[in-house]
Amino acid sequence: MSIPVGISACVLGEKVRFDGGHKRNRFVTDELAKFVQFRPVCPEMAIGLPVPRPTIRLVQRENGERLVDSKGGELDFTEKMQAFADKHISGIQSLCGFVVCAKSPTCGMERVKLYIPNGNTVPGGTVGVFTQKLMTAMPWLPVEEDGRLQDPVLRENFVFRIHALHDFYQNVRSCLSLDAFVKFHSRYKFVLMAHSPTAYREMGRLVAGIKDWDLAEFFVEYRQQFMDALKKHARRSNNTNVLMHLQGYFKRNLTGEQKQELLGLIESYRLGHQPILVPLALIKHYLKEYPDPYLQLQTFLNPYPEELKLRYGL
């Protein structure tokens, strides 16, 4: 089943920008689109602005940040945009991620230009009106800008998070039970260890106390803690720790020479000489040769389709 992901329509290649153009992202349209179902939206067109249209900007005023026309600032679209955002977001609660257009006064995720009356900009900028509403209403949702997806680390993290959230919805939300939570959490043991050892320990205690919770409330709490943990990028040192744990499962099966080979590849990864794919490939080989039911279920080994080639640069 395709993963539902929201997206700024211009990033998908739709000609909806103020100048009649688009901001097509080739990774999004040529690679990621094979595995997700994009649900495009252009907030500016949704509130009735035409294509082409005069530009709009965010301006800091006494009554807060306002979305106004760039020419004179007399046309204020703030309330209209906020109302649209509230209505739209209420109907997309099943989404597993959202790709937004960078620098846009409606969709930008960070460092969007925020002007002050004298024409200067506020250092650090702000967040687009629509995306601010989105991230406030759905704080667990993976949200990323089109430009940042060019960074291999940010790209891998975002794609992994949308797959993980979809997995959570498919295997936990669809059959809310204590057993479903425990099985899901067990599959993500090494993922959590890699992304955040602190969250790994805290969530272990959370799951251990699940019987004290109402399951619907536990679902909300677990989802937030889980997605917060995955948002932290897996550091090389943490990944190395996970690889060492994984190789330990084969210590009774491998010869001394095989152990040294695997340890050498893990050390080479730790030093930054090899991508993580190299030791993982050998671990997967040994897992086929010496099957282990627990390891075979670990998401860390197969977090998303290999065709995306996201671990090649990690």
Image (spheres, rainbow, N blue to C red):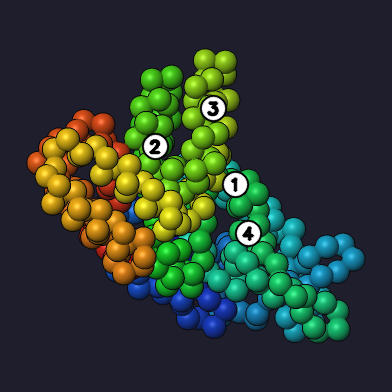
Query: Would you say residue 299 is visible in this rendering?
Result: no
Q: In the image, is residue 291 above or below residue 247?
A: above
Q: Quadrant of the N terminus?
A: top left
Residue that numbered label 2 is attached to: 189
Marks 4 and 3, Cα distance to the nearest angstrom?
33 Å
Q: CA distance from mark 1 to mark 3?
A: 19 Å
Q: Label 4 belongs to which residue?
A: 130
Give the amino acid type for the residue marked by disc 2 in the picture.
Answer: Lys
The front one of 109 and 188 is 188
Q: Secondary structure at mark 4?
A: helix
Please say if the residues under marks 1 and 4 sit with CB atoms less than 8 Å apart.
no
Name the residue type under label 3.
Answer: Leu
97 or 288: nearer the eye? 288
Mark number, residue 206: 3
Q: Earlier in the sequence, mark 3 or mark 2?
A: 2
Answer few, some or many: residues within 10 Å of disc 4's Cα (few below 14, many 20 plus, some between 14 and 19). Answer: many
- The local crowd at label 1, few if under 14, some if 14 to 19, many if 20 or more residues have their Cα within 10 Å, is few
Q: Is residue 311 left or right of residue 149?
A: left
Is residue 300 placed above or below 249 in the rendered structure?
below
Dot 2: what SS? helix
Of the two numbered discs 1 and 4 on the same chain, state the one appearing first in sequence.
4
